[in-house]
Image (cartoon, helix red, strand yellow):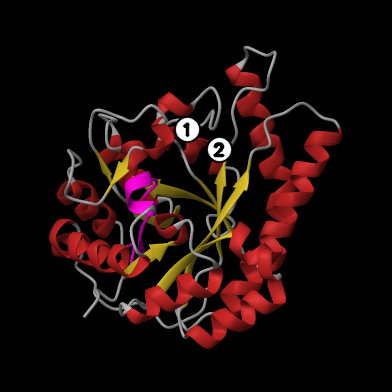
Amino acid sequence: MTHPRLSMNHATIKHADFDAALAAVTAAGYESYGTWREPVQAIGLAEAAKRFADSGLRLSTHCRGGFVTMPEGEARRAAIADNLRGIEETATLAAAGAPGSRAVFVLVAGGIPAGETGIADARARFADALAELAPEAEAAGVTLAIEPLHPMYASDRAVVSTLGQALDLAAPFDPAVVGVTLDTFHVWWDPEVLPLVARAGAEGRIATYQVCDWKTPLPADVLLGRHYPGEGVIDFASITAAVERCGYDGDVEVEIFNEDVWSSPWDEVAARTATAFDAAVAPYLTATAIPTLVE
């Protein structure tokens, strides 16, 4: 049986369409799934919600929004509008999911706009966007989950590089409205990661926990350097135990960006993910049941 808290993030089987992904995940015995926006938009939100409801899966997260670090203007307004649509998608899919579904919308800040050199300015614009989006998320019952990315992505993808920065950005808001995404691939290197996980837990900010491994050498496209848990150097025991001590009892997503994984049959990926999770992560999960209240 697949671990009851294991969730398959759609990025791990990136090339599957929505129906194929749901079929592979349910056939492998998963109870939870993390959706991505592109497959949902390909069939329309209403149809995706119906098919998701029929699958019997619960929603762990909806990925992803953000990318709002550009100066005020047409492009920024379009990005804000797109994030508002993402909030609506998240609320709709969570409502369609099985009991225990979480309305968590993952946000990646965005990089430094072309022609600029000010990372602090870009980060401040992301903070401004949070202030604009938070009331809409609160009204929809959605948690915005800021995801810090490894510093190697700071220039082009995320000017939020540490869990501490993410927590500082979330601090002005109710934890039910703005939390953080804790992804092992992005935070494992930080010497302050365990104290920061404890801080996130004390503040009630851990909206989702994602796992995959770090292994060198990295590929030419460093975005695709993720591996199955247990294949690399990440200490899942200490990080997972720290997350558990915080009282986090939600799903744990496996999110892998890797061309070899993407080119493998989806049923094989689902099975291998479950096996890797059982060996590397599950032994450190103290809670095995998901609360049935839809959040």
Tell me if 93 is positioned left or right of 20 in this view: right
Residue displayed at 80% across by 35% down: 75
Considering only vertical position in the picture, is 22 above or below 208?
below
- Judge whether residue 171 can be spotted in this image: no
* 271 drawn magenta: no
- Specify few, some or many for label 1: CA neighbours under 10 Å numbering under 14, 14-19, or 20 or more: some
Which residue occupies the foreground of this view, 126 or 203? 126
Q: Label 1 is placed on what type of residue? A: Gln
Q: Are marks 1 and 2 in contact (CB under 8 Å)?
A: yes
Task: Point out which mark residue 169 bears.
Answer: 2
Residue displayed at 67% across by 14% down: 116
Q: Quadrant of residue 206?
A: bottom left
Q: Which residues are magenta?
A: 248-262
Where is mark 1, residue-wise? Answer: 165
Query: As drawn, which residue projects farthest toward the right?
Result: 74
Where residue 103 sits: x, y (%)?
Answer: 56, 67
Which residue occupies the foreground of this view, 289 or 178? 289
Local secondary structure at mark 1? helix
